[in-house]
Amino acid sequence: MSDEIKNIQVTIDNITIDVAPGTTILNAARQIGGDVTPPAMCYYSKLEGSGGKCRTCLVEVAAGSTADPRPMPKLVASCRTTVMDGMVVKNMTSEKVPEARAGVVEFLLLNHPLDCPICDQAGECHLQDLGYDHGKEGTRYQFTRRTFKKEDIGPYIQLHMTRCILCYRCTYVADQLTNKRVHGIVDRGDHAAISTYISKAIDNDFSGNMIDVCPVGALTDKTFRFKNRVWFTKPVDAHINCTTPGCCGKATLWLRGEEVFRVTARKDEWGEVQSYDGKPGWICNTCRFETKKTESWTIEGVTTISRHSVIGANKYNTTLVKPNETVKKVMKGVEPKLLMDIHSVSGVNNPNVHLSDINGPAHSDDFKK
Ligand code: SF4
Ligand code: FES
């Protein structure tokens, strides 16, 4: 008898594919790609045990399997439900899913502040995207929202618990990547919160990856926060010969001119770290927080950013195309007398001040030197 494991067939939004037994609906949908894939705020394929917390990935199972084609009575969490042979799933094509997802978003936003204009995660926040896609105009919540003071949970990371959606991803990173987990979720129910028992205790080599996995702006990079809006920076892929065991040395540098404002792990289309040789491409804190000179890195090229992302605005071209000079044309042939470069006259944009070197958010005093 052959030991070959037979693939099984699943149909998602009228698209049928063959997947290996044990595949979840979410991962089967990711194999199809595009809008068929449900959003996932807590599941992270590189973190064991993740998923099942946020319910954003709900889908309708219209037929359980070929053997038992009855529909499942309730919507199911696609990140935790494995496919069966002949299963028929509806995500985009379901009438129930958009309403349920809107309800989940309303729950996630019960206590979450609508502070995107001042949040460092704006432009790359999964909750912001979800809010735009499924959010409602108002809230029906009538009670006082939970608020917390910002907390330095280590030399490089600030926790803004008010924004946390308790997805548990950061605790899995701490458990699975670092040799001592010193933070976690304390208390229960409405009181549940991320915290450390000993203040400012998170200092292990891979703790920076918690920032990368956080789907919202709850964990932010203290060396980058308030230095720049992410859509003003230019991401490039770069690598370094890092000797820290477990660090892949492949990163994305977020540049403004020649200045490196931020270093992150490279992300895939699902917002997760990319894999290299079958292993997740985590990076160490030395690469992330302390290697902020372009000359330390070998730059490979411009990072491919989705055209639909605000970060990709104006930079999905990999070559620079200069626009034609149009002043003379629109002025009916009259040449401009003077074209001023505001960067050379504005004190706020003093080109000699390296924003990434300033400790903390930039202040007008920083430009008076
Ligand atoms: S801090 Fe971020 S990663 Fe950690 S549980 Fe909260 S939302 Fe998730
Ligand atoms: S991604 Fe499935 S429950 Fe959160």
Image: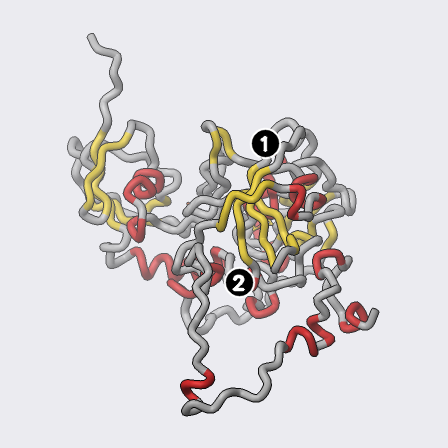
Q: Which mark is residue 231?
A: 2
Residue 147 quadrant = bottom right
Q: Residue 265: x and y, percent? A: 56, 43
**Residue 281, above or below 98:** above
**What residue type is disc 2 on?**
Trp
**Residue 202, above or below 67:** below
Between residues 40 and 96, which one lies in front from this camera angle? 40
- Tell whether 73 sits left or right of 67: right
- Tell whether 72 sits left or right of 218: left
Q: Residue 112: x and y, percent? A: 56, 62
Give the residue displayed 32% in from the left and 59% down from the top.
98
- Tell whether 212 sits left or right of 155: left
Numbered disc 2: secondary structure: helix
Specify few, some or many for label 1: CA neighbours under 10 Å numbering under 14, 14-19, or 20 or more.
some
Q: Residue 188: x and y, percent? A: 60, 47
Q: Residue 220, can we see it?
A: no
**Residue 339, above or below 128:** below
Between residues 180 and 362, which one lies in front from this camera angle? 362
Task: Read off the residue under disc 1.
Answer: 176
Give the colouring mode of the picture: secondary structure
Q: Residue 154: x and y, percent? A: 74, 46
